[in-house]
């Protein structure tokens, strides 16, 4: 076959160089190559339907059949628990993928026919004219036969076929429109269910997730949404007086408040760890950090202070959560974490507010301010660069710090190593987790699971000094200062 899995793998390797992980890269490569197959087939054969059908075959054999076989073997989560296969989600995902491939085939076939008509038809027309004049005898007798009228039956069938094709395309577009999460998170998003849990002390096995809103004073009265995870015992009558530590999780860019629950499986990880008795129950808050349209917020206060996302998180959101939920309202029981832009934001906000957050978790993050919200003001960018501000904020030196990176995740792995060197100079304790992988949700899922396991709620400042803990892809190294 012209476009086989080997070619898909080769193209996916090229796409990986642009910063995507292997799973999404392989999926995108398969779509590109099947679209290319339709384009080439339609350009040579002038048959759209045949090209589209061929596209479906190419996509099935080069990608989808292998994807289904792979996903039919349920994996284990970070804690070693089996994640059961959700057959319905697998079927829905496969259908969406196939619909997307056929839409790509339709586009490719249309372009292929158009190219043929534009490039090849004029050339063929000239060749036919020359051939008729040279090789065919001139007609000398008899009138030129009149064109036969197109049969009404044939016209009706043709019109019916066109209408049917249009209806099929509308259905394919509707099905393919559900493909957003396959590109944002991963092609296998949601295919495997949460491991079987049993519950602790009569509590439900799972916590509760809900959406809440608050009016932010820092954002000049904006109504801001955020997601909340409440632990299993939160709504049990006998535990109505119990209070819980709080973990704030910030999404990357582009992103939204649901990302950590959907792509990061933060609630699933919390449920599993709580059920196993490995961590105390906690509340998770995941806010929406989107700001002005067309630019990332960086989870910071803009230079013109018309977009104070940092103040919203550190002041408005924390105060609202402490007032409306049963939290332990002190920095020792309040942590903040995030991925990529959210990792930067978590570090930046925590260092600016060490009396609000006692711990920060930065996964695949960076530690120097970037983006347009700082107004290209060098001093203001320094004041919002954790690599710089940590040096001048001694009150932040006793914070708990969890840093995560992946070997193939550049330039973020390098940024993390640079930040670690700064922490080492200051003899600041931190934990570093290094995984094999890319800038992707599977890495952040695992690292957030490990970060929850690592969290030490209520730890005194004394226990936060003296040692850096560095995990090197499966092993842990202690560095004495």
Image (tube, rainbow, N blue to C red):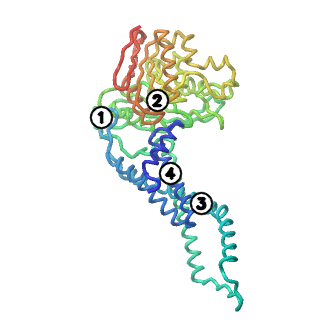
In the picture, the quarter occupied by the N terminus is: bottom left
Q: Is residue 314 left or right of residue 266?
A: right
Going from the N terminus, do you reach mark 4 or mark 2 first? 4
Q: Residue 77, position in %: x, y? A: 34, 36
As helix, strand or loop, the secondary structure at mark 3 comes to helix
Mark closer to the observer (3, 1):
3
Quarter location, residue 376 = top right
For disc 3, the marked residue is 112
Residue farthest along the front direction in this orientation: 134
User: Which numbered disc flags the more N-terminal residue, 3 or 1?
Assistant: 1
Q: Earlier in the sequence, mark 1 or mark 2?
A: 1
Residue hosting label 1 = 80
Does residue 212 show up?
Answer: no
Counting the numbered discs, the total is 4
- Compared to residue 92, the image places residue 162 above or below, namely below
Q: Nearer the viewer, residue 70 or 362?
A: 70
Q: Secondary structure at mark 1?
A: loop
**Residue furthest to the bottom:** 142
Find residue 9 and report its image quarter: top left
* One can see residue 2 in this view: yes
Residue located 38% across and 30% down the image = 449
The image quadrant where one finds the C terminus is top left
Residue at the (36%, 17%) spot, across then down: 477
Circle 4 SS class: helix
Q: Are marks 3 and 2 in contact (CB under 8 Å)?
A: no
Pointer 4 residue: 31
Q: Residues within 10 Å of mark 2 (few under 14, many from 20)?
A: some
Q: Nearer the viewer, mark 1 or mark 4?
A: 4
In this view, the mark in front (1 or 2): 1
């Amino acid at each position: 076959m012209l476009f086989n899995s080997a070619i898909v793998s080769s193209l996916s390797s090229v796409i990986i160089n642009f910063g995507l992980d292997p799973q999404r890269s392989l999926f995108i490569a398969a779509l590109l190559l099947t679209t290319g197959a339709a384009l080439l087939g339609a350009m040579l054969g002038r048959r759209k339907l045949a090209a589209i059908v061929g596209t479906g075959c190419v996509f099935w054999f080069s990608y989808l059949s292998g994807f289904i076989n792979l996903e039919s073997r349920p994996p284990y989560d970070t804690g070693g628990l089996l994640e059961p296969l959700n057959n319905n989600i697998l079927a829905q995902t496969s259908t969406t993928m196939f619909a997307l491939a056929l839409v790509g085939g339709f586009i490719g076939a249309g372009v292929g026919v158009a190219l043929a008509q534009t490039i090849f038809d004029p050339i063929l027309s000239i060749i036919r004219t020359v051939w008729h004049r040279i090789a065919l005898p001139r007609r000398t007798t008899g009138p030129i036969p009149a064109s036969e009228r197109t049969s009404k039956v044939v016209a009706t069938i043709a019109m019916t076929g066109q209408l049917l094709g249009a209806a099929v395309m509308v259905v394919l577009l509707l099905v393919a429109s559900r493909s957003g999460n396959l590109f944002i998170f991963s092609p296998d998003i949601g295919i495997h269910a949460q491991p079987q849990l049993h519950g602790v002390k009569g509590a439900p096995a799972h916590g509760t997730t809900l959406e809440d809103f608050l009016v932010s004073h820092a954002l000049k009265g904006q109504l801001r949404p955020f997601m909340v995870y409440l632990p299993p015992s939160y709504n049990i009558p006998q535990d109505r007086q119990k209070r819980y530590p709080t973990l704030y999780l910030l999404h990357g860019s582009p992103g939204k408040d649901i990302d950590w629950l959907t792509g990061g499986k933060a609630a699933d990880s919390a449920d599993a760890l709580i059920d196993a008795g490995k961590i105390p129950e906690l509340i998770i808050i995941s806010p929406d950090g989107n700001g002005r349209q067309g630019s990332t917020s960086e989870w910071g206060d803009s230079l013109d202070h018309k977009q104070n996302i940092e103040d919203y998180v550190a002041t408005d959101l924390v105060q609202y959560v402490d007032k409306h939920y049963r939290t332990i309202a002190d920095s020792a029981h309040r942590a903040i974490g995030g991925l990529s832009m959210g990792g930067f934001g978590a570090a930046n906000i925590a260092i600016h507010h060490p009396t609000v957050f006692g711990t920060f978790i930065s996964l695949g993050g960076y530690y120097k301010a970037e983006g347009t919200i700082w107004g290209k003001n060098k001093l203001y960018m320094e004041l919002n660069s954790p690599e710089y501000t940590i040096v001048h904020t001694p009150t932040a030196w006793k914070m708990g710090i969890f840093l995560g990176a992946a070997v193939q995740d550049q330039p973020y792995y390098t940024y993390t190593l640079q930040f670690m060197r700064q922490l080492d100079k200051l003899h600041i304790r931190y934990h570093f987790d290094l995984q094999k992988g890319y800038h992707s949700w599977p890495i952040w899922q695992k690292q957030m699971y490990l970060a929850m396991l690592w969290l030490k709620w209520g730890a005194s400042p004394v226990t936060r000094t003296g040692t850096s803990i560095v995990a090197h892809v499966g092993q842990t190294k202690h560095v004495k200062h």
